[in-house]
Image (cartoon, coloured by chain):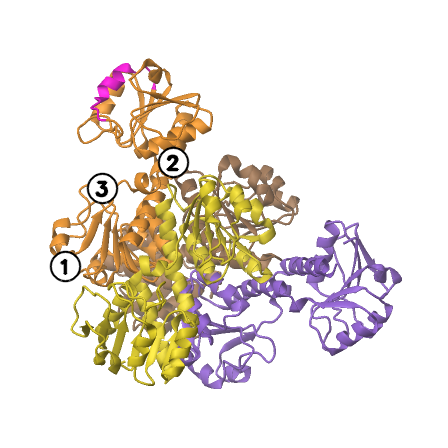
Chain colours: A orange, B yellow, C brown, D purple
């Protein structure tokens, strides 16, 4: 890649700019305050034409903020997605996060090749690592006991559940994993963890020191939270609406938190490396 | 144990009071503000006689503060060790941390059976767990990358080095361990880590993402720090004088910290469980 | 299960008979010489009617031998599948291994509920354990070096590949795994093994001490075998036609073997437990 | 090393000859039938003078056989140790196994620098690997169940116990380890195994599938063997007199075996690499 433009984003995009600059790519940025200087990085203060000379443009992950504009954090500004797309040259490649109707239609309208990085398998698997490690960091920070020797329950055995289980086991926790599929339960069991089918959850939940949820469904409802120990720590990693009835948790005086976007918070450099790696994979495939 | 007195200390002693109270022991405390109420805990506001009716008295770990008095944190007060010992009945059992001349002489003079918990093998091994896990927590907090996949070097292969190596390996780090004894180097190698004899240290230090020191000797001196990568994170776990030339580290702009007493900070409940377990072992042996 | 009939089979069926007998089931057998006596086991010397009074009949895995008859090992006899089915009562449940046209048609014709245990997911996963452990045993027997510290390559990352990789890693081998799917390669990498995409296979194959194949396709062809080290051990676990050009291997003087049906050979008791467990699952579902 | 003479020995010495020959050393052998030809290996049919021109002479491990002569296996011959030493030049370096009075006195008398490889720490640790792996191979061969998921008890937590525990755990066994020292018990516990102090041995022994002994003392005596399950497999790795009352085991119909010298049997090439590595260490130190 000779030239890359990065518009908006957070610490991950800053690290991505540096990684790419160090490997020889000329990087133009807009709406991203990078404190480390590098000769290959040019900061644009306006949406100047050179930004759109790049064959590849990187947008934030997720690309949109809650107000519906491009997810620019370092700058007070509302930037419509279409404003950007209108400035792009046809056949530009756009790498972004979290697809929706708008970006699909704009891509069509302006003949842009847009790729949602979040839907890439490599991204999901690799991202599970900083997510799991971040969850462990949060757990360590919020507990007054060691994870080693503690009883830790993971709800769900998808990518994050798998990595989290192995790391907790590696630290020395007594790991139990809840899953629905028979196939998963057998794998869990033979990995050395306690396999918990859904109908056994209520009985095993009683004795846990810490519970991690990775399932995007209300699995820790009021009834189950009632059974949880008073000093149990609950960490929800599942995207909206999440898996915990937080109102009930508050009522019962339980310590529960929703931790989304952990990679960007706890390991932005690793998260940036993942974004760059997957971007390279997409570009290779594109050609 | 029917009755236990706890004088001074930190979060670990608070948790110890609760653990003992929950298991049926009557606990008197002095100089320790415990927020959780329990019917078996009595808080003494003066050095009242009932404190000294207990067969067993628990002092802080370490028992002395920098001013030479009993290590009371929750209360502004200078309490001489001899003041306490004068009030004790002969044959009282005192469990404390970090032996010195003074406590040995006082024990003799007042016929007290005093035991330094820090010198107990079980204590040292068990305490290595919250120390290592605390070091990992600190490392996670201070890095912008994941430990998984990173290059981590441990200096020293004593108790903490051993536990730390296994945990880092369990998380997925690429672990190298420096040791002096041939026996240790062979064990390191066959545990799946990279074994680093002292004369290879200078060459391997260049490529590390993170370095943990557990050796109480100036191993990371000015010359070696010069070779360390600019973005390497250094965590020193060795007691005074420590193993890092911090002045040189500051000059070179390196991120180095001294983390002592981690168990009390990151896992006071576990640390308290260890204190209680070792106390029980001492008492069993005493009888 | 009150009553069970077992017709034909090998050591696995003998152990299954004992397991069931010990748990209180009355077991009738035909064509199976069990040396251990148990009061709940009745040996039938002819295809007597009591065999067909059982609601459940267990056939061998695979149920058919090379001559097309029921897979009876302990007795010289050709027994047609239809001969058996004709004697069964309608609605009998038959548990067998390796489905084909004949058994499907006979099941229909005689109104038999037949279940191919080999197609059950639980069976495949659980069976991967004795298969992988058996492969390790064969490797240990055939090598004059330790697996610990050796370079071991696994071709394929399905069920057997996964379990085998973890076990070899647990023993201390340097594990590399070849896979085709990107998703698999990322998992392999982050499990601590070397991930080998197919186009890198030729270069990595050169340095291996031992190669396990789990892929049912001619992956170790003449060209690749040429590159293998003279003292490399090759173990093929893939069912017919297998993944090794054995003729070429012989020409090149390489030590290669085809090891099929390992569970029955190296761990018949475990294999029997798996058959019984999956049978129970099938029966539960059937009701 | 320019020249090396190897006199007597088994498969390990044959592999050692090949290893050294391949790395450029001229190797003279006597009483060792090596089937693989190598230009750097000269086979002497008599105790010819060239054998004693080497600065270094390698003897078997152990150097003596039961008749008190040099441990020559490939040749019917009784060779007195003194016969050999009389032919050596003063200051020759002799590497051998298992020291006794005789070799010490002969070394003095003929001014020979003799080194017992068995007493080298590196040797003991490294040799624990093929010993443990060999024990696992024997266990796999003698059981009709998988080690994965089985209950395995190890008696003793020295070098072999440590390596064996980790390997069994890595395969997926449920590992318990008996030890005497408190320090060891704490390490065992925090490694994820069940720690068994001697006074708990009798109760835990009842439920084991397989027991490995590494303690050179009669730990599995008649009383304990009585409690062992009928189908339990016992593997004794401890040198004479061993840790099992074999007569009682036979009476009770238990399957017990004494497996000594496993490295030479199951992994002679690895054992030879260890001998060569330790020999090099000794020579370096000698200079």
Q: Is residue D168 visible?
A: yes
Tell me where residue A192 sits by quadrant: bottom left
Residue D156 vertical position relative to residue C147 in the rendered view, above or below: below
Circle 2 sits on which residue? A274
Q: Is residue C90 visible?
A: no
Please state, as top left, top right, bottom left or bottom right, where the C terminus of chain A lies in the image.
top left
- Which one is nearer the viewer's eye here, D253 or A115? A115
The x, y position of residue B208, in whole percent, is 49, 44
The x, y position of residue A18, in whole percent, is 41, 30
Within 10 Å of disc 3 (Cα), the crowding (few <14, some 14-19, many 20+) is some
Circle 1 sits on which residue? A226
Q: CA distance from mark 1 to mark 3?
A: 23 Å
Q: Secondary structure at mark 1?
A: helix
Image: magenta residue range: A76-92
- Which one is nearer the viewer's eye here, D86 or A78? A78
Residue C213 vertical position relative to residue A209 in the rendered view, above or below: above
Q: CA distance from mark 2 to mark 1?
A: 39 Å
Residue at image point 21% right, 21% down: A80
The x, y position of residue C217, in whole percent, is 48, 41
Circle 3 sits on which residue? A239
Is disc 1 in contact with disc 3, using a CB cutoff of under 8 Å?
no
Q: CA distance from mark 3 to mark 2?
A: 20 Å
Chain of the residue that carries numbered disc 1 in the rendered image:
A
Magenta stretch encompasses residue A107: no
Horizontal side of D78 relative to B105 (left or right) equals right
| Residue B267 - label | none
Q: Secondary structure at mark 3?
A: loop
């Amino acid at each position: 890649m000779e030239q890359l433009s990065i518009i908006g984003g957070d610490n991950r995009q800053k690290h991505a700019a540096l990684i790419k600059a160090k490997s020889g790519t000329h990087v133009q940025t807009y709406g991203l305050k990078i404190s480390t200087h590098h000769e290959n990085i040019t900061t644009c203060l306006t949406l100047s034409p050179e930004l759109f000379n790049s064959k590849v443009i990187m947008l934030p992950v997720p690309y949109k903020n809650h107000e519906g504009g491009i997810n620019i954090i370092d700058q007070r500004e509302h930037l419509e997605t279409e404003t950007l797309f209108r400035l792009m040259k046809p056949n530009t490649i756009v790498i972004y996060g979290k697809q929706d109707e708008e970006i699909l239609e704009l891509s069509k309208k302006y003949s842009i090749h847009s790729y949602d990085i979040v839907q890439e398998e490599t991204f999901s698997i690799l991202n599970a690592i900083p997510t799991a490690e971040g969850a462990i960091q949060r757990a360590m920070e919020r507990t007054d006991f060691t994870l080693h020797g503690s009883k830790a329950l993971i709800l769900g055995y998808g990518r994050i559940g798998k990595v989290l289980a192995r790391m907790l086991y590696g630290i020395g926790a007594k790991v139990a994993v809840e899953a629905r599929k028979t196939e998963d339960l057998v794998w869990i069991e033979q990995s050395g963890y306690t396999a918990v089918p859904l109908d056994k959850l209520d009985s095993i939940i009683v004795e846990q020191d810490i519970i991690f949820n990775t399932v995007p469904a209300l699995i820790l409802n009021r009834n189950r939270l009632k059974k949880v120990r008073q000093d149990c720590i609950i960490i929800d990693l599942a995207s909206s609406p999440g898996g915990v009835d937080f109102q009930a948790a508050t009522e019962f005086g339980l310590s529960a938190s929703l931790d989304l976007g952990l990679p960007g918070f706890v390991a932005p450099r690793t998260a940036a490396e993942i974004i760059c790696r997957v971007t390279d994979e997409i570009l290779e495939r594109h050609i």
